[in-house]
Image (cartoon, grey):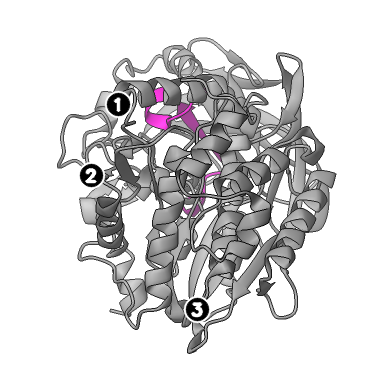
Amino acid sequence: MKRTFFGLVCLAFLYGCSSPESSTTSGKFEIDTVAVANHLKTLSSDAFEGRKPFSPGEEKTINYLKEQFEKIGLEPGNGDSYFQDVPMVQINGTPDANMSVTGGKTPVTLSLNDEYVAYTDRPVESVSLDNSEVVFAGYGVVAPEYGWNDYEGLDVKGKTVIVLVNDPGFGSGDSTLFKGEQMTYYGRWTYKYEEAARQGAAGCFIVHETVPAGYPWLVVSNSWSGGRLTLDGDPGNLCAVQGWITRDAAIKLFEASGKDLRNFREMSRNKNFQPISLGMNTSIGLTNTIERNTSKNVIAQIQGTEKPDEAIVYSAHWDHLGIGTPIDGDSIYNGALDNASGTAVLLGLAQAFANKEVMPKRTVVFLAVTAEEQGLYGSQYYAENPTFDPQKIVANINMDGASYNGKMKDLTVIGYGQSDMDDLAATVAKTQDRYIIPDPDAGKGYFYRSDHFNFAKIGVPALYASADYEAVDGGVEAIQAQKDAYLTGRYHRPQDEYDAVDWQYGGLYQDAMLYLTIGDQLANSNSFPKWKEGSEFKSIREGN
């Protein structure tokens, strides 16, 4: 159902919210959706130029956040500063227009952006693959706990590996193969490159398929071209060239090799799969311009009255893709849903806590991180350089893409079953007449695709959950249709814009109030949420 902005304001009042001006003096401990809408509209406007790090849009964004935190009355969260410097390097790579693969039955030429993308995270002026032997390495996974090693018996030093996206369990119909339809970290694209580098490969290309990847090729060609950001410092062991190829390009290579790879995905699901050299060599070069600069996380806090050294951290990434390739005449990638919306909710939570008559016993931190879109780098830097002892960070609540639908029936939890945070969320959701549901798209690996993951990696229990499955009006079908339309028409495109007519705030209000309630409970508690048995993060927290 379409709503005008006036209708949204009315809806906000129906949920007991007031105008931004009155809410700052009312002292009500709740979310002001009108203020959230105003922040969302501002942050996703063309004036902020898509909020890319190292751009004028970054300066506008971080100063806006600082000003809002100051206006709300929060203290700086990094000593006497609202900013945390994040040293980064931008690598503006220009790959060859074509990637050549010779040998086999016939030579193959792949065209840039249409059939392949390539980049490097090595901060050097040029990299290349020169007649590098091409090897198909299945899923490119080494997982001892599953008795799985796609590189067993193979020396890939100096070679280029082609690997499949996701992990062997996805689409297999076998719930005992890895975690079945739920992606493990072995299915994440970052893992593929990390493992290929550990094996000594010079290059690694992932075969893109829309369903197991979770996004179409256009997202790949938009996101993995142009300038790439990474943390500055020793890059460690990295492949010289990393990239993606389309499924059709992979089939073209397999057919040209003369090898029997007609059922390449099925054969790769066999634990006894052996890597296959295609008997072909690839050559490709990249020239780079290197720019070193400092991006910024923005941090504000309300200091705890009794246990100021213990903290609950709310997080959202402020960045998006900036100005890029025009689509339908628009080149500003506004990132309204991804993630001006989560950042706006972060400000709404800060305002609600500041309005509280009794301040929390533990410190409450509001963290807006940079460079999520480039690889979760802002939250990685914070996790490596936290403002609190990780053992005293009680929990993280992360927001990446707020609900833009009306009132919802569900709370969908990404990574359900990992920690006690799920139980806290279920209890609060029940008071809202909502049920809790594990992510029905667990195969897309969302648990590894947002900033809460870096908190988990240092042992901090994290909640990443939102209304995402069933609407009160329209049910499951309406939400699925909206998600499909967003993924195919707006995700990582300039079309991800704020629309006062389409945005509805019922689900956002439910979620934000749930985040607020859980954070308040934890901020006034003596206990720490725990990781559950079987979680790979339990030993990090508990040291065993």
Residue type indicated by callout 2: Lys
Tell me which numbered mark, 3 or 1, is placed earlier along the sequence. 3
Residue 498 occupies which quadrant of the picture? top right
In this view, the residue farthest toward the top is 106
Residue 109 occupies which quadrant of the picture? top right
For disc 2, the marked residue is 179
Q: Mark 3 to mark 2: distance in Å?
A: 45 Å
What residue span does the magenta drawing correspond to? Answer: 197-216
Q: Quadrant of the C terminus?
A: bottom left
For disc 1, the marked residue is 476
Q: Within the magenta stretch, is there residue 389?
A: no
Q: Secondary structure at mark 1?
A: helix
Badge 1, how many Cα within 10 Å: few under 14, some, many 20+?
some
Q: Quadrant of the N terminus?
A: top left
The residue lying at 45 percent from left, 81 percent from top is: 392
Of 225 and 530, nearer the camera is 530
Q: Mark 3 to mark 1: distance in Å?
A: 40 Å
Residue 132: x and y in percent read: 58, 34
Residue 410 occupies which quadrant of the picture? top left
Residue type indicated by callout 3: Val
The residue lying at 78 percent from left, 33 percent from top is: 46
Tell me which numbered mark, 3 or 2, is placed earlier along the sequence. 2
